[in-house]
Image (cartoon, rainbow, N blue to C red):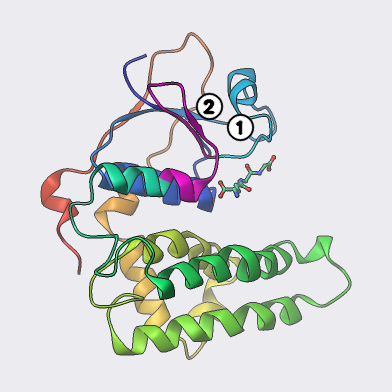
Amino acid sequence: MNFPILYSFNRCPYAIRARMALAYAGITCELREVALRNKPAEMLAISPKGTTPVLQLLDGQVLEESLDIMYWAIEQHDPAGWQGQSGLNSELGQNLITANDRLFKPYLDRYKYAVRFPEQPQEVYRGQAEIYLQNLDDLLRSHQFLISDLMTMADVAIFPFVRQFAHVDLEWFYSTTYKHLQAWLTWHESSTLFLHVMQKRPAWRLGQPITLQSPLPPQNVLVTQ
Ligand SMILES: N[C@@H](CCC(=O)N[C@@H](CS)C(=O)NCC(=O)O)C(=O)O
């Protein structure tokens, strides 16, 4: 094996943030696109919990949480300072990511798959998620990105989830007063980095030719706005 292997699902927000961090950090990896309904035995053998993304490193170590993959990637190389000025443990960044993963994501799931949660109308779930979105919009009022005018890990870790939320009802999202959040989302969705990691790949099968995810060219890494 010449490259770390990433088991990934194209539109999974956790996998998107992992792929973005790897491409940003200049890491080439073998990309194995997974069909969630038919997970490859090779992935389940190294990560029985069966979620994407999973990264198998060259020394055999397995990272099976998207944030661990992001941390590992930017510890290897952090060309535009995603760790932020206060380092990896920027308290605000950490808190925002934790709130995204633990509070916002469950509401997002209920909003997106409201038919599976008939206890409340869809708008109720949307309203619960909006408390978090309002907080992001307030932060983006004062600077271009969540923590400052520079992009950090928090922006990348959170953006795929806001994207998923917006796409449930794009017309509604763009009709709201979250103007800063809308601009931030549009910026990320059209960024070279995002488009780079969203290239479609056929589902992986053992024995097929290897598909690589290449690093983002250095000239694109440093563009922040
Ligand atoms: N905590 C995990 C969550 C990953 C996750 O839940 N991924 C979803 C896809 S977006 C998944 O694989 N779900 C399993 C399934 O649908 O079978 C991480 O951060 O990597």
Label ID, residue 157: none
Q: Which residues are magenta?
A: 53-69
Type of the residue with mark 1: Ala
Residue beneath the point at 87% across and 69% down:
118
Q: Secondary structure at mark 2?
A: loop
Is residue 204 among what the camera can see?
A: yes
Is residue 198 among what the camera can see?
A: no
Give the distance between the C-alpha atoms of the residues marked 1 and 2, in whole angstroms.
6 Å
Ligand 1 position by quadrant: top right
Label 1 beta carbon within 8 A of ligand 1: no
119 lies above or below 180? above
- For the residues labelled 1 and 2, say whether their Cβ atoms are less than 8 Å apart: yes
Decide if residue 106 is on the left or right side of residue 67.
right
Q: Nearer the viewer, residue 82 or 117?
A: 82
Residue beneath the point at 22% across and 60% down:
81
Q: How many marks?
A: 2
Q: Which residue is mark 1?
A: 35
Q: Which residue is mark 2?
A: 203
